[in-house]
Image (tube, coloured by chain):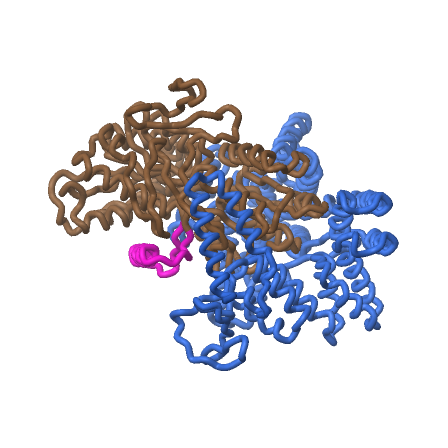
Amino acid sequence: MNQSAKSLFLAMFLVFSLAYGATGYAKIQKAIAENAITTSSPDSSGDPLSGLASGQFNQIAETVSALALSDPDRAKSIVSALQTNALYQDSRHGLYLEKENGYADIRSGQKISLTDDGLKPVRINNKVRLALVTSTALFGLSSPNAATRLQSADTLYSHAIPAFTPKISAALAQEKDQKVKLAFEKAQAAAFLSETPLATGDNARLKAIAILKKSGGLDAHNILCRIAASSLESQSVKQSAKKAVSSIEFRLGFWDLLQNAFYGLSYGSVLLLAATGLAITFGIMGVINMAHGELIMIGAYVTYLVQQSIHTVFPALDPFALVVAVPVAFLACGALGVLIERGLIRFLYGRPLETLLATWGLSLILQQAIRSLFGATNIEITTPYWLAGSFMLGGIEITLNRLVIFLFAFAVLGALMMTLRRTSIGLEMRAVTQNRRMSALMGVRTPRVDALAFGLGSGIAGLAGVAATQIDNISPNLGQNYIIDSFMAVVFGGVGNLWGTFAGAMTLGMGDKVLEPSIGAVSAKIAILVLVIVYIQRHPRGMFPLRGRGVES
Amino acid sequence: MPVSMPSLTRRDFARIALFSSMAAMGGIIGSGKAFAEPKGEPIKIGILHSLSGTMAISETTLKNLMLMLIDQQNKKGGLLGRPLQPVVVDPASNWPMFAEKARQLLSMDKVSAVFGCWTSVSRKSVLPVFEELNGILFYPVQYEGQECSRNIFYTGAAPNQQAIPAVDYLLSEEGGSARRFVLMGTDYVYPRTTNRILQNYLQSKGIPAEDIMINYTPFGQSDWQTIVSRIKKFGYAGKKTAVVSTINGDANVSFYKELSNHGISSIDIPVMAFSVGEEELAGMDTHALVGQLAAWNYFESIDTPKNKAFIQDWHRFSHNPKRTTNDPMEAHYIGFNMWVQAVNKVGTTDHDKVIDAMIGIRQANLTGGVATMLPNHHITKPVYIGEIQKDGQFNTVWQTPEPIAGQAWSPWVPESKGLIGDWSAAVHCGNYNTLTHTCIGHKS
């Protein structure tokens, strides 16, 4: 009876929406609204599970949330089945869990031998996903593990579900751990404030607002903004919510400044990494290497190959493929750099225009070669677990991949400085760039030094490529994103001076990120370019020019 | 910029460059030859897709697809008993070069139809050439509308076939009842026009202007930190917020990476993308993207016998069982088959006759239903909303009950209110004003 009523209803809906669709597309919105109405009406039948087989996302979500409260044990198995696409339905609203060998009827628990034909998985969307996440968090409140309880409380804090309030309160009453208790209080306040004001008194609401105000942050901001704008709340509640919002905004504004500074530093360190190699080949050797970006790109592809081969040979080492890729990319790109220097650039010393054209041509060849070898589409490099996510430092959110790149850029710069200052090859490099003929007369093999210096610069480009895999998409065009910024950082900082490159990259990164929030990404890029042009016109040698007799006029 | 300057570069270098470009072209020619069933002078088909430069990532696939379709047609006996012959050119993601190559295809190679272009700016740059030389262009990509040329057939989605249904879904209860919107885009004509249409549309749905944030980024943007943190701040202000993204294909990867690093998942702030398809997802680590949305007229995951066969053919042709299919590929499939039908109908490849015969041609979609060529040279299309899955495919969560007719001119932009395109004999005008009953005619 119930089911026939339901199918009648569905049929009516189908006819309805078809009729609407036929009259034109502007009516679709209405059809969706109708759809929403049919689905949001609660199921009147006695069977608490029938919503799962309805094929309507709203009903599935509601059923999951209701079950999580009324029948947690059953809900747990359903939630995990939905998450792994292991819940199936047949054409007659039967529901089955997938087991190792066959299916089990969800209502009776009996094993059933079924062919796959009549079954289709119960599919989920974001609405259902939210119900799954919050239900899982609800189960987690009573976990013996404090970390799980804390995480569950945080989830219920950012996704407040009013119906969960009693369960949270019960969990709070039993909690001993101070830290978890605090998180429970916040979650309780959030869930409480999401209920309609009629159900609760003003005083309790004011207390909840105070808790959220104290905790601060965007989740609290989100809830309090809703309260402040709600027409159902009393004046005093609204007033206090408004006050709390502005207090939170003030605190957020302060942290925002620091946050932008971190963004600037992190963007600057990416520029620095990309420009360091160029600081040697262009800054010290004077070679205009338009293929620098492609060396970065090849570094990224080497990372990809390393990851692939490690994945096939030692899958257990997968998370550390990036670490292995660092020396490999350095050596591979360094060797390629030596090859380029020996095969192309050494014939062109002293002819900057021709070097520029030749290396630009080379960059096109390298791009097309990679495109023919690996295809034009992006390749996938997985982010290891130790680089994913972020942590909060005060009110600043620090993303791990950016932090690691930041440290990596400094390590590379430091290592390079040491090489130039403390090793014999570094000494020879500096000697050759200052006075080539005299170095030759002193017994330095200048061609070898040239090749090694170019190789070093290219190797560092390869390192930049390894870092780029974690923030950028890897396609043959990758290098083009970096070449202009790299040259800008080197020229702006002062050609021939590593500290100059450092200062140039950081200034450009900071400038970009400070301007971006106020004038937009496009205008920020333009503004930075204009500022650099004006600065270079006044100080053609950049921020930190080389001084002394060694400098050519 | 011209690349070859032999007087300046070394001879070896020039030889390498020449060799590599020849090698790149070599694979392309020859593969079109069939088992020589059809006889007579070949019918030439131009393929105008970038095979190098930034757009190669998307367009190379379409070139290969066209070769496959032509190959299949030849195996079926060609067209009008004659073999089809592809003429592949590489406009190298360079917009003026698109116009040059289009002119070459039409006036030197005398092709019967051209399948090509991806970006709107490339289409705008070839449009005058096609109108001057009376060519036929099939354009397979979703675009901003506001154009209706007699010489172009738009087989991709117009804004009302992708953007507006997508926003409707976000507004609906199932889609999360979003009441605050971030319209993100790369800074060029397609996102700007689409966002303008959406802004007006959203306001008509009662979303106040202060709840709509519009943000543009340059091409190839890779540092999204400040932008994502702005979105986050905007999205945590009391109303359910959704992002509508017209970010150009390639820049999406780093955008999604930044979102997931900031801990924003699809249940916090869903992102509805118009330029992210199976092809783009193939290069992404999709774990953090599960639940993010895309609106298209085709998904590879839609299970129909026709789609299955198409995917199988594609795997066999590309010798890669993992190659994905995507929406613009289906658009070319529909466009090509419509053109074949039209040529068969009039018995000639004469451009004017084929153009007139195209209107009303019907071709089955791969995902079910039938596409019809409308008098405004757009086609009817079903609209699907899909959620990204772990395997890089889409799970369809919503679809229009009926195919939707493409609108060349959007009623949501004041300047084009009341305009229609109608190339049937009765009206014969690309921008007919239904309010004043006049044809505006040529105006660029």
Q: Position of residue A501 (x, y in %)?
A: 66, 42
- Highlighted range, magenta: B299-326
Q: Nearer the viewer, residue B27 or B336?
A: B336
* Quadrant of residue A235 within the rendered picture: top right
Horizontal side, residue A194 vs residue B372: left or right: right
Which quadrant is home to the N terminus of chain B?
Answer: top left
Any magenta on residue B323? yes
Residue A482 in view of the camera:
no
Farthest residue, direction front: A1
Horizontal side, residue A437 vs residue A248: left or right: left
Q: Nearer the viewer, residue A270 or B86?
A: B86
Horizontal side, residue A63 vs residue A198: left or right: left
User: Residue visible at 51% across and 67% down?
Assistant: A85
Q: Nearer the viewer, residue A90 or A256?
A: A90
Q: Position of residue A94 (x, y in %)?
A: 48, 71
Q: Colour of chain B?
A: brown
Residue B95 in view of the camera:
yes
Q: Classify B221 as above or below A552.
A: below
* Quadrant of residue A22 within the rendered picture: top left
Q: Colour of chain A?
A: blue
